[in-house]
């Protein structure tokens, strides 16, 4: 089963869709993969952030246009089948958040907006603080990502924001789902949890996880779903 087609068919509804990505272990991969899928279907897509993103000069987002200035992006009329990157410049390596209030204005220009709304310092798991994630009120779908690569490894090595010790076992993954500061924090609209990296790492024990949202055991890189729970 193809991951991006599944997300499109089951969660993208109506003329305007605003997707916020949270968690760890694959947000940027998902951002690029879903954008390319939707672009190939003839959708106009905006990629942006309410936290930070690597600059397009350092990472290929496979977009048609890049904007760093608010007036420029608001005055641009995207074509169908076109993807656009918009964020503010921070430094030589990263961009930072746009003004969240601009999402409403931009939503009238694009079929789909995909927002990287969280940061995890390239770790597969995330425990949030009071300041994150930054999920805008206009969000129609929250995609929450957890990496299977963290399973049975030391918590301090795989979970951003956690001060616990021990292994990231099934109970730890479940605690991240249940914790108010865990993976489901700040979700809006529809929601889905992706257990990513299942093409590379064992996930069978993680099939016992319980969540109020649907769990997709998948590989974003391979565009594949292996199990739906």
Image: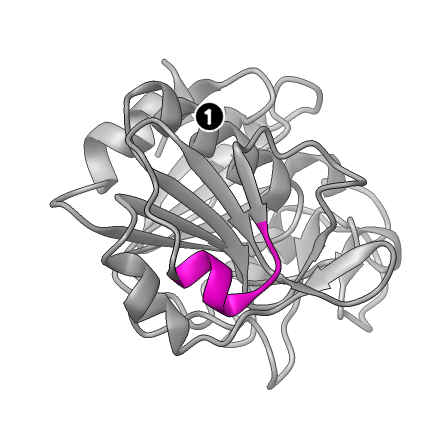
Q: Confirm whether residue 193 shows in the render.
A: yes
- Residue 170: image location, x then y, percent: 62, 46
Instruction: In the rendered view, tell whether residue 34 sits above or below residue 110.
Output: above
- Its colouring scheme is one colour
Tell which residue pokes out farthest to the bottom in this image.
130
Q: Which quarter of the figure is the N terminus placed in? A: top left
Left or right, 33 with respect to 89, comes to left
Who's the residue at 68% across and 61% down the image? 119
Instruction: In the rendered view, tell whether residue 56 sits above or below residue 21.
Output: above
Left or right, 30 with respect to 53, comes to left
Left or right, 226 with respect to 92, comes to left
- Residue 212: image location, x then y, percent: 31, 56
> Quick one: 3 or 226, which is closer to the camera?
3
Left or right, 171 with respect to 82, comes to right
Q: Which residues are magenta?
A: 67-74
- Residue 190: image location, x then y, percent: 25, 55
Who's the residue at 48% across and 34% down the image? 207
Q: Which quarter of the figure is the C terminus placed in? A: top left
Residue 15, by quadrant, is: top left
- Residue 138: image location, x then y, percent: 29, 68
Who's the residue at 70% across and 19% down the image? 200
* SS at circle 1: helix
Residue corresponding to mark 1: 36
> Quick one: 69 or 227, which is closer to the camera?
69
Assign the magenta stretch its main secondary structure.
Answer: helix
| Residue 69 part of the magenta segment | yes
> Quick one: 28 or 124, which is closer to the camera?
28
| Residue 91 part of the magenta segment | no
Who's the residue at 88% across and 53% down the image? 157
């Amino acid at each position: 089963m193809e991951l991006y087609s599944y997300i499109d068919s089951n969660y993208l509804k109506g003329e305007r869709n605003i997707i916020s990505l949270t968690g760890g272990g694959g947000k940027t991969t998902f951002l690029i993969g879903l954008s390319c899928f939707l672009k190939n279907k003839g959708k106009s897509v905006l990629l942006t952030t309410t936290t930070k993103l690597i600059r397009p000069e350092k990472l290929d987002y496979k977009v048609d246009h890049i904007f760093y200035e608010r007036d420029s992006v608001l005055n641009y009329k995207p074509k169908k089948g076109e993807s656009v990157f918009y964020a503010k410049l921070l430094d030589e390596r990263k961009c930072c958040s746009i003004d969240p209030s601009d999402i409403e204005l931009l939503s009238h220009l694009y079929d789909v907006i995909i927002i990287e709304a969280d940061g995890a310092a390239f770790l597969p798991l995330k425990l949030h603080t009071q300041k994150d994630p930054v999920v805008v009120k206009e969000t129609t779908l929250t995609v929450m990502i957890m990496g299977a690569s963290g399973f049975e490894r030391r918590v301090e090595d795989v979970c951003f924001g956690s001060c616990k010790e021990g292994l990231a076992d099934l109970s730890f993954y479940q605690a991240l789902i249940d914790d108010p500061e865990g993976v489901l924090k700040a979700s809006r609209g529809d929601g889905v949890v992706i257990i990513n990296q299942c093409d590379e790492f064992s996930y069978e024990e993680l099939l016992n996880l319980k969540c109020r949202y649907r769990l997709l055991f998948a590989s974003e890189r391979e565009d594949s779903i292996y199990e739906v729970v």
